[in-house]
Amino acid sequence: MQVSERERYFFDLNGFLLLKGALSAGEVAEINGAIDALLPIAPGQWKGYVHGHNYGDDDGLNLQQIYEGGAAFEKLIDHPAWIEKVKYFVGGAGTFDYNHGPLFIDECFANIRGPGEAIGLHSGGHEGTKRTQFRFFNGRFHCGQINILMALTDIGPGDGSTMVVPASHKAHFPHPDEDRHSMFAEVASVDGVEGAVHVYMEAGDVLLFVDSLSHGSAERVNAGERRIIVYRYGPSWGNSRHGYQASAELAARLTPERLQIVRPKAPLLPK
């Protein structure tokens, strides 16, 4: 699943790609079953090495370190539907091999939202953050963070869809609606933000985007829940966003290829 010429053009232009049917129906069912086995979990509570978390502003429940939750999540670390595309956009064609630990997942979580929940507008090229930057130099992409957002339920109108502002990864100024629609603001959703578009997804679809793209979500108004998983990939020199560390048990289970993405370098200590 290499990057096509069309994908390269529209990622460069818009900052995101929608990968239809990246996960099979069987994979989606397996993942949802594995999430069900972890629930209930409250913010601040641990289930093994999976941690309940939220930001405290009606953004739903996050299950942080979700790759610790079992085989269904371990398979996502280097899933063939997106891993080559992630490599390409993080560092450029021809620069990667697993012996040099090119990638690092600095955060991975499942998110569950119900009615009334959303997340406000955040990020944007104007911030210039190295960690999330979009960069193309000398014929290659050098993106600091590529997000893989996996839909585990159908997400249509009223379901709290992810919303993005196309091409905002190249913006030099903050969005005029940011103050009113950012996280913890008056309207902590992207509903009504000028230029923002809904990304409607069927279960199994994947949204690939550079984190410097301005994004957030609509408020869910329908009954039921919206389920997604996000794996955030960057270069191997990155560090865990929240301070989580892969457990020794996970490291012992993973293939060498997956372990090198989760832990690019083993700790070097005196003997």
Image: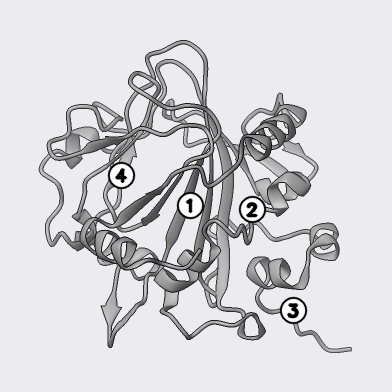
Q: Amino acid at mark 4?
A: His
Q: Amino acid at mark 3?
A: Pro
Residues at discs 1 and 3 in contact (Cβ within 8 Å): no
Residue 264: % across, % down: 65, 75
Which of pointers 1 and 4 indicates the residue nearer the eye? 1
Give the label on residue 267, or none: 3
User: Dot 4: few (<14), some (14–19), or many (≥20) neighbours within 10 Å?
Assistant: many
Q: Amino acid at mark 1?
A: Ile
- Would residue 201 appear left or right of 271 to someone viewing this image? left
Q: Nearer the viewer, residue 79 or 122?
A: 79
Residue at (47, 68) in percent of width and height: 2
Q: Quadrant of residue 248?
A: bottom right
Residue 210: % across, % down: 36, 59
Residue at (37, 66) in percent of width and height: 4
The residue to which callout 4 is attached is: 215
Q: Earlier in the sequence, mark 2 or mark 3?
A: 2
Q: Quadrant of residue 104?
A: bottom right
Q: Nearer the viewer, residue 3 or 131?
A: 3
Q: Earlier in the sequence, mark 4 or mark 2?
A: 2
CA separation in Å, label 4 and label 3: 35 Å
Residue at (70, 71) in percent of width and height: 257
